[in-house]
């Protein structure tokens, strides 16, 4: 079945540093891929998504490119802010269902 | 637009008591999901509904847990009797079905069972 693996955290960065959070997937076909973010004390919210191979999703300065050659969907941001401190989840649909399969989450801590 | 609404936001109860968590999905969404999140186990899908019908309840931990969706705008997750190991944050999410579309999460209910 479909699955996703993302890098362990926590990731600790100084403000304005470059961020990469790795995510790789295994899937039947080419499903949509998602990054969700969870700020402290809140529910998950969609950060960005890509619906087909080679698509780039972007939002709030974050980007991720759907790469079928490497089965990856890595999250990047050129200059992180303290307000980006959160847990980030990579996700994709379970095959032929409405369920989303979430990665284990990567905690990002940004210090001034 | 109102997002997914959950109540209560916080619940503290004693072991053995019945707990009912409530969710109102986004209007027009026809898939609804209940998740549990803990530090130890991360985010777990408990059950999901499509058009008010339970489709997959394989994540429900045991018979003490039950979920209903009597209509398109309301769902409950009940734990009876509750145990300390049920302490967690419970999230409800909704989406448009048919394409594993974006799920919209509620703010969660933080349950503490003493």
Image (cartoon, coloured by chain):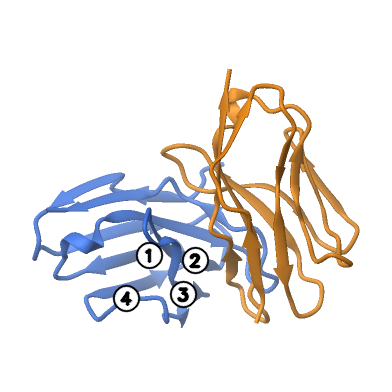
Chain colours: A orange, B blue
Tell me the quadrant of the picture where the N terminus of chain B can be found: top right
- Please tell me whether mark 1 or mark 4 is closer to you in this view: 4
Q: Are marks 1 and 2 in contact (CB under 8 Å)?
A: yes
The residues bearing labels 1 and 2 have C-alpha atoms spaced at a distance of 8 Å
The residues bearing labels 1 and 3 have C-alpha atoms spaced at a distance of 9 Å
Q: What chain does mark 4 sit on? A: B
- Please tell me whether mark 3 or mark 4 is closer to you in this view: 4
The residues bearing labels 2 and 4 have C-alpha atoms spaced at a distance of 18 Å
- Which residue corresponds to mark 2? B32
- Which residue corresponds to mark 1? B75
Q: Which mark is residue B52?
A: 3
Give the vertical position of A84 relative to B15 (above or below).
above
- Sequence-wise, which precedes: disc 3 or disc 4? 3
**Nearest to the observer: residue B17 or residue A38:** A38
User: How would you rate the neighbour count of disc 1 (Cα within 10 Å): few for under 14, some for 14-19, many for 20 or more?
Assistant: many
Q: Which mark is residue B61?
A: 4
| Residue ID at (49%, 66%) | B32
- Sequence-wise, which precedes: disc 2 or disc 3? 2
Which picture quadrant has residue B22? Answer: bottom left
| Residue ID at (55%, 47%) | A9
User: How would you rate the neighbour count of disc 2 (Cα within 10 Å): few for under 14, some for 14-19, many for 20 or more?
Assistant: many
**Nearest to the observer: residue B41 or residue A31:** B41
């Amino acid at each position: 079945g479909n699955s996703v693996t993302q890098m362990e955290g926590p990731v600790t960065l100084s403000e304005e540093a470059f961020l990469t959070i790795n995510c790789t997937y295994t899937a039947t076909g080419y499903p949509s891929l998602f990054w969700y973010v969870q700020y402290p004390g809140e529910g998950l919210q969609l950060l960005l998504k890509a619906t087909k191979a080679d698509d780039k999703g972007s939002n709030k300065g974050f980007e991720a490119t759907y790469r079928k050659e490497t089965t990856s969907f890595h999250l990047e941001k050129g200059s992180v802010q303290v307000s980006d401190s959160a847990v980030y989840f990579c996700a994709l649909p379970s095959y032929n269902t409405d369920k989303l399969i979430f990665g284990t989450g990567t905690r990002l801590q940004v210090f001034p | 637009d109102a997002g997914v609404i959950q109540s209560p936001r916080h619940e503290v109860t004693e072991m053995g008591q019945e707990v009912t968590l409530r969710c109102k999905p986004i209007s027009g969404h026809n898939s609804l999901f209940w998740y549990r999140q803990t530090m130890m186990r991360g985010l777990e899908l408990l059950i999901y509904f499509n058009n008010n019908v339970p489709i997959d309840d394989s994540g429900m931990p045991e018979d003490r847990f039950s979920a209903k969706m009597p209509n398109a705008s309301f769902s409950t997750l009940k734990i009876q009797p509750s145990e300390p190991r049920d302490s967690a944050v419970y999230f409800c999410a909704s989406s448009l079905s048919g394409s594993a579309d974006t799920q919209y999460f509620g703010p969660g209910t933080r349950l503490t069972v003493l």
